[in-house]
């Protein structure tokens, strides 16, 4: 008869070897994935598009980012589109928003102050995000909290929702 030690030690060795092989394979898969993504980014740098109002937009993953002069500051703007260009409807909507920006900003401020925001926590307008046809979000900084931001969502011209993120 054989004792338990005669077969237990070789079995444990096989299990340990299998675990080591699995770990090496998992680490190799992660490293290869990182290298593949780095190569993909190098082959496909962010795209560029010239917009008449915003100037140069950069696009990645179907979203396009640009800057709009707003008083003495720059206002970050993002809009949807394809991999090759912003959506034409988004550009037309953006042109309408820019034409009405002072009035829309005033409505957004009133909506924020009717909600939880106060004069002390509602800072300057910092960004606009076109979320869809007739949907835009105004982003206001919060001077009392450096990472805080008030968001006012417009749908079809109406300020409908106020939210906060930090």
Image: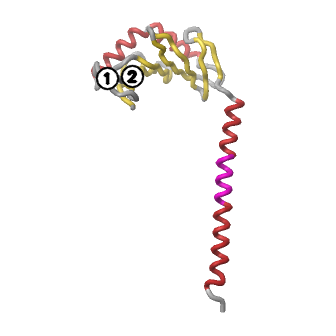
Check the image and report above or below for 11 versus 2: above
At which x and y percent is residue 32? 69, 46
Q: Is residue 28 magenta?
A: yes
Q: Secondary structure at mark 1?
A: loop
Residue 153 placement (x, y as % from top left): 40, 23
Compared to residue 26, the image places residue 5 above or below, namely below
Q: Residue at (39%, 24%) from the top-left corner? A: 151
Residue furthest to the bottom in view is: 1
Q: Determine which of the numbered discs, if any, sits on residue 141 in the image.
A: 2
51, 87: nearer the viewer: 51
> Residues in magenta?
22-31
Left/right of residue 6 with respect to residue 92 in the rendered view: right
Q: Nearer the viewer, residue 70 or 59?
A: 70
Q: Is residue 161 magenta?
A: no
Q: Position of residue 146 (x, y in %)?
A: 38, 27
Quadrant where the N terminus is found in the figure: bottom right
Q: Secondary structure at mark 2?
A: strand
Classify residue 20 as left or right of residue 159: right
The residue located at (51%, 18%) in the rendering is: 77
| Residue closer to the observer: 50 or 27 | 27
Q: Depth check: 62 or 122 in front?
A: 122
> What residue is pinned by disc 1?
121
């Amino acid at each position: 008869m054989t004792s338990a030690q005669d077969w237990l030690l070789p079995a444990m060795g096989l299990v340990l070897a299998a675990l080591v092989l699995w770990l090496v394979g998992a680490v190799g898969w992660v490293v290869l994935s990182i290298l593949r993504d780095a190569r993909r980014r190098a082959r496909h740098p962010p795209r560029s598009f010239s917009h008449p109002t915003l100037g140069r937009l950069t696009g990645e993953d179907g979203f396009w980012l640009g800057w709009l002069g707003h008083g003495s500051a720059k206002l970050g703007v993002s809009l949807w589109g394809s991999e090759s260009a912003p959506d034409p409807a988004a550009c037309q909507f953006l042109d309408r928003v820019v034409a009405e920006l002072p009035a829309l900003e005033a409505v957004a401020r009133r909506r924020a102050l009717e909600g939880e925001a106060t004069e002390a926590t509602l800072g300057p307008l910092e960004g606009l995000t076109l979320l869809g046809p007739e949907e835009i979000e105004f982003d206001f900084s919060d001077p009392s909290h450096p990472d805080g931001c008030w968001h006012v969502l417009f749908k079809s011209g109406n300020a409908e929702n106020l939210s906060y993120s930090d």
